[in-house]
Image: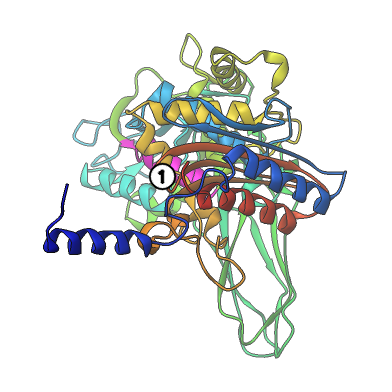
Amino acid sequence: MCLNKHAFQVALFLLCAFASLPTSAAAANPAETPTLSEALTRYLNTARKRIGGQSTIAVSVSDAKTGQEVFSYRGGEPMTPASVVKIITSAVSLKALGPDYQFPTEIFVDYLAHESAPKESGTSAKGFVGNLYVRGYGDPSLTSEALWRIVETLRLAGVRSLRNIVIDDTLFVDPPGPSGARPYEAGSSATSLNYNCYEISVGPGRVGEEAIVHLGVGAYGTLKNSAKTDARSNKLILGQQPPSETFKPSFVGNATDPIREIVMPTESIIVKGTISASQSRKTHYRTVSYPPLYLAYALREMLKQSGIKVHGKLMRGETPGTAKLLHVQESESLAVILTDLNHFSNNFIAEQLLYALGEDSVGYRRRELGLDRLRTYLESAGFEALTFSLYDGSGLDNRNRLTTNQLVRALVDMYQDFAVSPVMISSLSRFSHSGTLKKRSLRDRRGRSPEGIAGTNLADAVWGKTGTLTGVSSLAGFVRTQAGKDLAYAIIINSKIGKHASTQVEDEIVKTIIELPGI
């Protein structure tokens, strides 16, 4: 067959054009290009020598579309996973609740505003609703802004005064309190606000004078501020006495009473040390000792600011059957909540989801039942109970054990379920772009990113959930290869080499996957 001159020129142009593509995207010589398994094995051999014998690395990679295993190194070995446990929590939540699930918060009153309420001492019959009941279902996304919307709804409904504020947190059975002062140690509650953390805003005054400190709405401790503004020194110390994790609530009345007054604790919020005069104002967050009281205290402040009088006390108990439903505040969808969970590795949200998953036959939420749902999910995927241990939904407990094979199986399950795959993938962080991977880059020392066809940045096609504990680093998620294949991957490193060295290994493994042509 002969080509005319024009056809020959076109063919020559196309040949030159394809030859000019980046070498990573050009057709590779099979004899020279290693398989992914070979490339990862080669890298891991090098990495093990670098990090020493006190470290254990496990890596699993599977085709997300078919589930076929592509690579596994110690993939069946149970290891401490840290926050990649949240992948299992997310998967089970999406399967059980659905991406559109919303957490309700119900507002009840004894009397509706337009009804004839009995006259009480110090109250006006007009707009008086008796007790106000807040029944929570564990909304992990309820914030001060949402609480303000509830208050405005009450005002528009004609509420002008009320007797007591009753917080009904009884749907959660034996929720754990905070395990420490830091936000990642917050406790669980059916009636939570602001991730069960209060704000301490600290800024400098004039040199030699006290620092300027403000507490956020709902903070019920007594502020003790001895911090000074210094020309240079910036050694601020924040504390609480007694510590939030040691607090035990007390009440007026008998334990059998359906509603009891909450005794105000004698807590001190301590700010001491120094703040530099050049330091900008900064907001710090600390765990609240008793979430129902925090919500009640914040609600009372907001009601008063809206002109609604509260004549009685702050109480805790079960909403009576005679109470009348006035308003239902719906949370953000589970899809939105999971983005906050995984982008920011929010332990509080993960633990709240355990309760949502742990509803018993009569409607109460139990943490252990939620954990059972996670375990059942792994068992239904074909994993024996002896190969994993789950003590929480967040990964904070260092007794947790998972394998990288189990994590990859969950990721593949999510990918193959079209109803939830967009939610799961978008909830994960991206290198240099979002979440806990925002400050991590796949660029080399010269600042160059891995490139694919026509110079596209392959790092943009990597999604991941990170995990960090002392001696633990992990990363799991999805990657799209140069050939357009979607892979699920999981990496766990149990090591004493330090976080920075561990993340370097993780990043190199991901780069090995995305830089290899033809897979």
Q: Position of residue 493 (x, y in %)?
A: 73, 43
In the image, what residue type sits under mark 1?
Ala
Residue reaching furthest to the right: 53
- Residue 161 lies in quadrant: top left
* Residue 64 image position (x, y, % from top left): 45, 32
Query: From where the camera sits, is residue 306 visible?
Result: yes
Query: For this view, does 20 lie left or right of residue 404?
Result: left
- Based on the picture, tell me whether residue 178 belongs to the magenta stretch: no
217 in relation to 105, above or below = below
Read off the magenta span: 329-344
Residue 492, above or below 148: above
Numbered-mark total:
1
Residue 125 vs residue 256, the one in the foreground: 256
Q: Residue at x 67, y 90 (%)?
A: 207
**Residue depicted at 60% across the width and 22% down the height:** 371
Q: Residues within 10 Å of mark 1 (few under 14, many from 20)?
A: some
Q: Is residue 232 left or right of residue 467?
A: right
Which residue in the protein does label 1 denote?
483
Q: Residue at x 75, y 50 (%)?
A: 47
Estimate the x, y position of residue 368 in percent, counting from the top left: 62, 19
Asked which quadrant contains residue 273, the reply is bottom right
Q: Main secondary structure of the magenta part?
A: helix
In the displayed image of the protein, which residue is found farthest to the top? 361
Residue in the image at 67% along x and 29% along y: 75
Describe residue 237's horizontal placement relative to residue 220 as left or right: right
Q: Is residue 59 above or below residue 446?
A: above
Is 335 one of the magenta-colored residues? yes
Q: Decide which of 376, 272 is in the foreground and name it.
A: 376
Left or right of 431 in this view: 416: left
Q: Is residue 188 visible?
A: no
